[in-house]
Amino acid sequence: MSQFAISILRKSRRPSRSIVFVVLSIVLSAVPICVGQTMQQGISVNLPVSRNAVSIPDADRNDSLIVSVTEDGNVYLGTSPISPTALAETIKRGMSNQKGETLYIKADARTQYAKVMKVLEAARTAGVESALLTGQRDASEPGTLVAPKGFGVLVSSPSPSGSESTVLQVLNSGQRTPTLKINNEQIPWANLQSTLKQLVHNRSEKVVRVKADGLLPFGDVVEVTDTCSSAGAKVALVTQGQ
Protein backbone atom coordinates (compact mmCIF):
# COMPACT_ATOMS: atom_id res chain seq x y z
CA MET A 1 0.00 0.00 0.00
CA SER A 2 1.22 3.48 -0.80
CA GLN A 3 2.85 5.24 2.16
CA PHE A 4 1.73 8.48 0.47
CA ALA A 5 -1.89 7.40 0.75
CA ILE A 6 -1.59 6.43 4.41
CA SER A 7 0.16 9.67 5.32
CA ILE A 8 -2.60 11.73 3.71
CA LEU A 9 -5.30 9.81 5.55
CA ARG A 10 -3.62 10.50 8.88
CA LYS A 11 -3.27 14.25 8.31
CA SER A 12 -6.93 15.13 8.52
CA ARG A 13 -8.27 16.01 11.95
CA ARG A 14 -11.62 17.50 10.92
CA PRO A 15 -14.46 15.96 12.96
CA SER A 16 -17.50 14.68 11.08
CA ARG A 17 -20.30 12.17 11.56
CA SER A 18 -19.73 10.36 8.29
CA ILE A 19 -17.19 9.97 5.53
CA VAL A 20 -17.92 11.83 2.32
CA PHE A 21 -16.84 10.59 -1.10
CA VAL A 22 -16.43 13.28 -3.74
CA VAL A 23 -16.22 13.15 -7.53
CA LEU A 24 -14.73 16.24 -9.14
CA SER A 25 -16.01 17.83 -12.34
CA ILE A 26 -16.08 21.29 -13.90
CA VAL A 27 -18.19 23.21 -16.41
CA LEU A 28 -16.31 23.47 -19.66
CA SER A 29 -16.67 25.77 -22.62
CA ALA A 30 -17.99 24.49 -25.99
CA VAL A 31 -14.77 22.55 -26.53
CA PRO A 32 -14.32 20.05 -23.66
CA ILE A 33 -10.88 21.00 -22.43
CA CYS A 34 -9.65 21.21 -18.89
CA VAL A 35 -9.83 24.66 -17.23
CA GLY A 36 -7.25 25.79 -14.68
CA GLN A 37 -8.13 25.19 -11.05
CA THR A 38 -6.96 26.38 -7.67
CA MET A 39 -6.80 22.76 -6.45
CA GLN A 40 -3.51 21.19 -5.51
CA GLN A 41 -1.59 19.84 -8.50
CA GLY A 42 -2.31 16.24 -9.49
CA ILE A 43 -3.24 14.04 -12.44
CA SER A 44 -4.61 15.95 -15.44
CA VAL A 45 -8.06 14.91 -16.74
CA ASN A 46 -10.80 16.45 -18.92
CA LEU A 47 -13.56 16.97 -16.39
CA PRO A 48 -17.31 16.58 -17.09
CA VAL A 49 -19.89 19.34 -17.10
CA SER A 50 -22.08 20.24 -14.12
CA ARG A 51 -24.32 23.30 -13.71
CA ASN A 52 -25.78 22.82 -10.23
CA ALA A 53 -22.64 23.05 -8.17
CA VAL A 54 -21.85 24.60 -4.80
CA SER A 55 -18.48 25.60 -3.45
CA ILE A 56 -16.30 22.89 -1.86
CA PRO A 57 -13.36 24.84 -0.42
CA ASP A 58 -12.00 21.84 1.50
CA ALA A 59 -11.09 20.20 -1.82
CA ASP A 60 -8.35 22.81 -2.11
CA ARG A 61 -6.67 21.95 1.19
CA ASN A 62 -3.06 20.81 0.99
CA ASP A 63 -3.96 17.62 2.85
CA SER A 64 -7.04 16.81 0.73
CA LEU A 65 -7.33 13.18 -0.33
CA ILE A 66 -7.81 13.26 -4.12
CA VAL A 67 -8.39 10.26 -6.40
CA SER A 68 -8.20 10.68 -10.18
CA VAL A 69 -9.60 8.40 -12.91
CA THR A 70 -8.04 9.04 -16.31
CA GLU A 71 -9.63 8.51 -19.73
CA ASP A 72 -8.09 5.04 -20.01
CA GLY A 73 -9.38 4.07 -16.55
CA ASN A 74 -6.17 4.31 -14.55
CA VAL A 75 -6.72 5.29 -10.90
CA TYR A 76 -4.41 7.52 -8.88
CA LEU A 77 -4.39 8.46 -5.22
CA GLY A 78 -2.75 11.85 -5.31
CA THR A 79 -0.17 11.22 -8.03
CA SER A 80 0.48 7.58 -7.11
CA PRO A 81 -1.14 4.73 -9.12
CA ILE A 82 -3.48 2.59 -7.03
CA SER A 83 -5.98 -0.21 -7.66
CA PRO A 84 -9.62 0.06 -6.50
CA THR A 85 -8.98 -2.88 -4.15
CA ALA A 86 -6.02 -1.14 -2.55
CA LEU A 87 -8.02 2.09 -2.42
CA ALA A 88 -10.77 0.42 -0.38
CA GLU A 89 -8.25 -0.92 2.09
CA THR A 90 -6.56 2.46 2.36
CA ILE A 91 -9.88 4.15 3.16
CA LYS A 92 -10.68 1.49 5.76
CA ARG A 93 -7.37 2.03 7.51
CA GLY A 94 -7.94 5.77 7.53
CA MET A 95 -11.42 5.25 8.98
CA SER A 96 -10.03 3.17 11.82
CA ASN A 97 -7.79 6.06 12.85
CA GLN A 98 -9.90 9.10 12.02
CA LYS A 99 -13.62 9.48 11.33
CA GLY A 100 -14.89 12.04 8.84
CA GLU A 101 -12.23 11.74 6.12
CA THR A 102 -13.24 13.19 2.75
CA LEU A 103 -12.32 11.48 -0.50
CA TYR A 104 -12.35 13.74 -3.58
CA ILE A 105 -12.54 12.07 -6.99
CA LYS A 106 -11.96 13.75 -10.33
CA ALA A 107 -12.87 11.48 -13.24
CA ASP A 108 -12.33 12.13 -16.93
CA ALA A 109 -15.59 12.78 -18.80
CA ARG A 110 -14.57 10.32 -21.53
CA THR A 111 -13.71 7.35 -19.34
CA GLN A 112 -16.19 4.48 -19.21
CA TYR A 113 -18.51 4.74 -16.24
CA ALA A 114 -17.53 1.15 -15.36
CA LYS A 115 -14.08 2.46 -14.44
CA VAL A 116 -15.58 5.01 -12.06
CA MET A 117 -17.96 2.39 -10.64
CA LYS A 118 -14.95 0.39 -9.47
CA VAL A 119 -13.87 3.36 -7.38
CA LEU A 120 -17.44 3.91 -6.15
CA GLU A 121 -17.60 0.25 -5.16
CA ALA A 122 -14.28 0.56 -3.35
CA ALA A 123 -15.71 3.49 -1.39
CA ARG A 124 -18.92 1.55 -0.67
CA THR A 125 -16.89 -1.43 0.55
CA ALA A 126 -15.00 0.90 2.86
CA GLY A 127 -18.28 2.16 4.33
CA VAL A 128 -18.62 5.45 2.47
CA GLU A 129 -22.29 6.43 2.23
CA SER A 130 -22.35 9.74 0.37
CA ALA A 131 -20.58 11.55 -2.46
CA LEU A 132 -20.31 14.91 -4.15
CA LEU A 133 -19.94 15.55 -7.85
CA THR A 134 -18.35 18.95 -8.22
CA GLY A 135 -18.53 21.44 -11.03
CA GLN A 136 -18.49 25.09 -12.07
CA ARG A 137 -21.84 26.83 -12.47
CA ASP A 138 -20.65 29.18 -15.23
CA ALA A 139 -18.06 28.66 -17.94
CA SER A 140 -14.74 30.41 -17.46
CA GLU A 141 -12.26 31.91 -19.89
CA PRO A 142 -9.49 29.49 -20.87
CA GLY A 143 -6.67 29.61 -18.36
CA THR A 144 -8.83 31.12 -15.60
CA LEU A 145 -8.37 29.60 -12.15
CA VAL A 146 -11.64 28.43 -10.59
CA ALA A 147 -12.43 27.07 -7.14
CA PRO A 148 -13.68 23.48 -6.74
CA LYS A 149 -17.48 23.17 -6.69
CA GLY A 150 -19.90 20.29 -6.50
CA PHE A 151 -23.25 18.78 -5.55
CA GLY A 152 -24.11 15.85 -3.34
CA VAL A 153 -24.89 12.28 -4.35
CA LEU A 154 -25.09 9.02 -2.42
CA VAL A 155 -22.74 6.14 -3.16
CA SER A 156 -24.84 3.48 -1.47
CA SER A 157 -28.54 3.84 -0.75
CA PRO A 158 -30.43 0.54 -0.84
CA SER A 159 -34.20 1.02 -0.87
CA PRO A 160 -35.72 0.36 2.56
CA SER A 161 -38.09 -2.60 2.63
CA GLY A 162 -41.64 -1.65 1.69
CA SER A 163 -40.78 1.86 0.49
CA GLU A 164 -41.30 3.28 -2.97
CA SER A 165 -38.21 3.88 -5.01
CA THR A 166 -37.66 6.05 -8.07
CA VAL A 167 -35.22 4.23 -10.35
CA LEU A 168 -33.65 6.05 -13.28
CA GLN A 169 -31.94 3.80 -15.81
CA VAL A 170 -29.36 5.28 -18.18
CA LEU A 171 -28.94 2.76 -20.99
CA ASN A 172 -26.46 2.52 -23.84
CA SER A 173 -28.55 3.10 -26.98
CA GLY A 174 -25.66 2.76 -29.39
CA GLN A 175 -26.33 6.35 -30.39
CA ARG A 176 -24.86 9.63 -29.18
CA THR A 177 -27.61 10.03 -26.56
CA PRO A 178 -28.35 7.29 -24.00
CA THR A 179 -31.85 5.89 -23.47
CA LEU A 180 -33.60 6.95 -20.26
CA LYS A 181 -36.14 4.94 -18.31
CA ILE A 182 -37.88 5.91 -15.07
CA ASN A 183 -39.37 2.93 -13.25
CA ASN A 184 -39.04 0.94 -16.51
CA GLU A 185 -40.92 3.52 -18.61
CA GLN A 186 -38.90 5.20 -21.37
CA ILE A 187 -38.89 9.01 -21.35
CA PRO A 188 -37.25 11.62 -23.61
CA TRP A 189 -34.34 13.64 -22.25
CA ALA A 190 -36.36 16.84 -22.63
CA ASN A 191 -38.89 15.56 -20.08
CA LEU A 192 -36.42 14.26 -17.50
CA GLN A 193 -36.36 17.26 -15.19
CA SER A 194 -40.14 17.84 -15.18
CA THR A 195 -40.89 14.14 -14.71
CA LEU A 196 -38.51 13.87 -11.75
CA LYS A 197 -39.99 16.98 -10.15
CA GLN A 198 -43.46 15.45 -10.27
CA LEU A 199 -42.27 12.11 -8.89
CA VAL A 200 -40.37 13.47 -5.88
CA HIS A 201 -42.61 16.47 -5.11
CA ASN A 202 -44.75 14.82 -2.44
CA ARG A 203 -42.19 12.35 -1.13
CA SER A 204 -40.45 12.78 2.19
CA GLU A 205 -37.34 11.03 0.83
CA LYS A 206 -36.49 12.72 -2.44
CA VAL A 207 -33.97 10.15 -3.63
CA VAL A 208 -33.50 8.87 -7.19
CA ARG A 209 -31.54 5.66 -7.66
CA VAL A 210 -29.47 5.97 -10.84
CA LYS A 211 -28.47 2.74 -12.59
CA ALA A 212 -26.20 3.60 -15.50
CA ASP A 213 -24.65 1.34 -18.14
CA GLY A 214 -20.96 0.87 -17.47
CA LEU A 215 -20.11 1.36 -21.16
CA LEU A 216 -21.35 4.95 -21.14
CA PRO A 217 -18.93 7.87 -20.85
CA PHE A 218 -18.79 9.19 -17.30
CA GLY A 219 -19.85 12.61 -18.61
CA ASP A 220 -23.30 11.19 -19.49
CA VAL A 221 -23.80 10.00 -15.92
CA VAL A 222 -22.80 13.40 -14.57
CA GLU A 223 -25.31 15.07 -16.91
CA VAL A 224 -28.13 12.86 -15.60
CA THR A 225 -27.06 13.40 -12.00
CA ASP A 226 -26.96 17.14 -12.56
CA THR A 227 -30.52 17.11 -13.95
CA CYS A 228 -31.73 15.14 -10.93
CA SER A 229 -30.16 17.71 -8.66
CA SER A 230 -31.86 20.57 -10.53
CA ALA A 231 -35.19 18.75 -10.01
CA GLY A 232 -34.65 18.79 -6.25
CA ALA A 233 -33.75 15.10 -5.99
CA LYS A 234 -30.86 13.49 -4.16
CA VAL A 235 -29.02 10.95 -6.32
CA ALA A 236 -27.95 7.45 -5.29
CA LEU A 237 -25.45 6.03 -7.78
CA VAL A 238 -25.99 2.28 -7.80
CA THR A 239 -22.84 0.19 -8.14
CA GLN A 240 -22.58 -3.44 -9.17
CA GLY A 241 -22.59 -4.58 -5.58
CA GLN A 242 -26.12 -3.21 -4.97
Image (cartoon, helix red, strand yellow):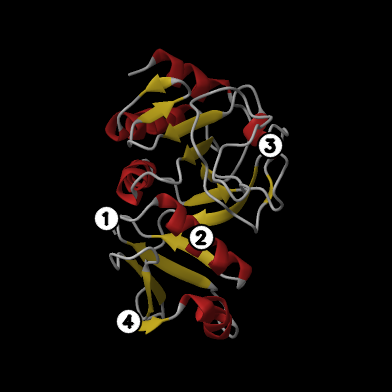
Q: Amino acid at mark 3?
A: Pro
Q: Eyeballing the image, is 235 above or below 137?
A: below
The answer to which of marks 1 and 3 sits earlier in the sequence is 3
Q: Is residue 184 left or right of residue 235?
A: left
**Disc 2 target residue:** 223
Q: Residue 85, how many percent across, how many down?
A: 28, 33
Q: Which residue is disc 3 drawn over?
A: 142
Residue at the image position 32 percent from the left and 43 percent from the top: 115
15 w.r.t. 42: above or below: below
In three-dimensional space, the C-alpha distance between marks 2 and 1, rounded to whole angstroms, equals 20 Å
Q: Residue flagged by tag 1: what amino acid is it?
A: Gln
Q: Position of residue 61 (x, y in %)?
A: 66, 27
Q: What is the CA distance from the residue labelled 1 to the residue labelled 3?
A: 37 Å
Image quadrant where residue 14 sits:
top right
Q: Are marks 1 and 3 in contact (CB under 8 Å)?
A: no
* Left or right: 94, with 29 as reference point: left
Residue 95 visible in the picture: no
Mark 1, residue position: 240
- Circle 4 residue: 184
Amino acid at circle 2: Glu
**Residue 147 x %, y %:** 71, 37
* Distance between mark 2 and mark 3 Cα atoms: 22 Å
- Relative placement, left or right, of 150 versus 235 is right
Amino acid under label 4? Answer: Asn
Relative to 191, 136 lies left or right: right
The N terminus is located in which quarter?
A: top left
**Disc 3 to disc 4, how far (Cα)?**
41 Å
* Badge 2 density bin: few <14, some 14–19, many ≥20, Cα 10 Å: some
Given residues 18 and 121, the one toward you in this image is 121
Q: What's the residue at 33%, 37% (across, down)?
A: 73
Which is in the foreground here, disc 1 or disc 3? 3
